[in-house]
Image: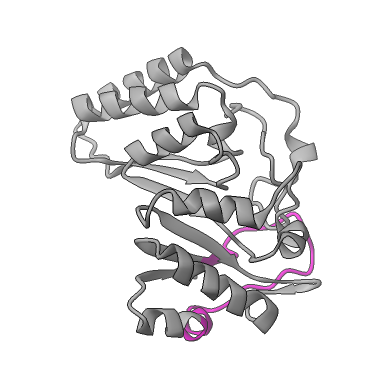
């Protein structure tokens, strides 16, 4: 992703990085060679200093799979991980919009933790909180997630916003049905933790989220709750 800007095909109302329009000063995507060089230098520095690394995570100011060299970057990262910190996990936080690209899907299958976002169960609800910057269809994203055959982590933001409430039946019940259909190896449910660009947003407590997802837990689905 850009080092001083933001590049994303979502413009989430809760994004800690702010609105897309506020981060357009730098839209330069680093090449795979740039990423490899910087990562190798950092991993070598940590190794020589005796600093442990648990996870190398793709996240931050945008959607990592938008980088056209994302598959090569993943392969390079895995090779460097194996050389310097073979016990570290490689994780990718993604909004799952690029799963229709076979090279992106195959790269995500290589990492230890493909963490894929789905905040709402319908296109209309996604439009309210994620504000996709292009064509987006929940049905297509779910079909893409199904290709992992459960071998991924589903990540969902629980929040209250004007015209949206994760606890309302119109949001919660169809989302739970999607979880049952996908049967991911784990579901990560979280809520607001940092300042958001939109006003009027509300967070959930851990006990509230626990109660909302308890039916899925009772069905044997592993759910991690972060408040």
Q: Quadrant of residue 87?
A: top left
Foreground of the two, 172 or 164: 172
Percent coordinates x, y for residue 23 in the rendering: 73, 35
Whether residue 226 is visible, yes or no, is no
226 vs 61: above or below: below
102 inside magenta stretch: no
Foreground of the two, 137 or 81: 137
Percent coordinates x, y for residue 194 in the rendering: 60, 58
For the point 30% across and 29% down, which residue is it? 78
For the point 37% across and 54% down, which residue is it? 149
Q: Is residue 184 left or right of residue 128?
A: left
Q: Quadrant of the image for the N terminus? A: top right
Q: Is residue 208 left or right of residue 196?
A: left
Q: Main secondary structure of the magenta part?
A: loop
For the point 57% across and 63% down, which residue is it? 193
34 vs 180: above or below: above
For the point 39% across and 61% down, which residue is it? 184
Q: Tell me, what colour scheme is on the image? A: one colour
49 vs 150: above or below: above
Q: Quadrant of residue 162?
A: bottom right
Percent coordinates x, y for residue 74 in the rendering: 39, 29
128 vs 2: above or below: below
Percent coordinates x, y for residue 153 in the rendering: 41, 56
Q: How many numbered badges does the structure rendering display? A: 0
201 inside magenta stretch: yes
Q: Quadrant of residue 169?
A: bottom right
Q: Is residue 143 left or right of residue 169?
A: left
Stretch in magenta: 190-212
Whether residue 79 is visible, yes or no, is yes
């Amino acid at each position: 992703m850009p080092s001083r800007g933001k590049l994303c095909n979502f413009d989430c109302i809760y994004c800690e990085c702010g609105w897309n329009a506020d981060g357009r000063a730098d839209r330069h995507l680093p090449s795979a060679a740039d990423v490899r060089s910087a990562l190798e230098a950092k991993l070598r520095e940590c190794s020589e200093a005796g600093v442990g690394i648990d996870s190398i995570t793709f996240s931050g100011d945008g959607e990592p799979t938008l980088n056209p060299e994302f598959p090569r970057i993943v392969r390079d990262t895995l090779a460097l991980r194996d050389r310097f910190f073979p016990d570290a996990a490689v994780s990718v936080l993604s909004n799952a919009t690029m799963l229709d690209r076979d090279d992106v899907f195959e790269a995500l299958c290589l990492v230890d933790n493909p963490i894929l976002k789905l905040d709402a169960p319908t296109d209309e609800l996604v439009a309210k909180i994620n504000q996709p910057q292009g064509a987006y269809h929940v049905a297509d994203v779910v079909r893409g997630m199904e290709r992992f055959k459960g071998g991924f982590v589903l990540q969902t933001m629980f929040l209250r916003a004007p015209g949206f409430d994760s606890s309302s039946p119109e949001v919660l019940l169809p989302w739970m049905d999607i979880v049952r259909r996908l049967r991911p190896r784990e579901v990560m449910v979280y809520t607001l933790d940092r300042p958001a660009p939109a006003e009027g947003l509300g967070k959930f407590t851990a006990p509230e989220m626990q109660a909302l997802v308890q039916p899925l837990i009772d069905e044997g689905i592993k759910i991690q709750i972060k408040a």
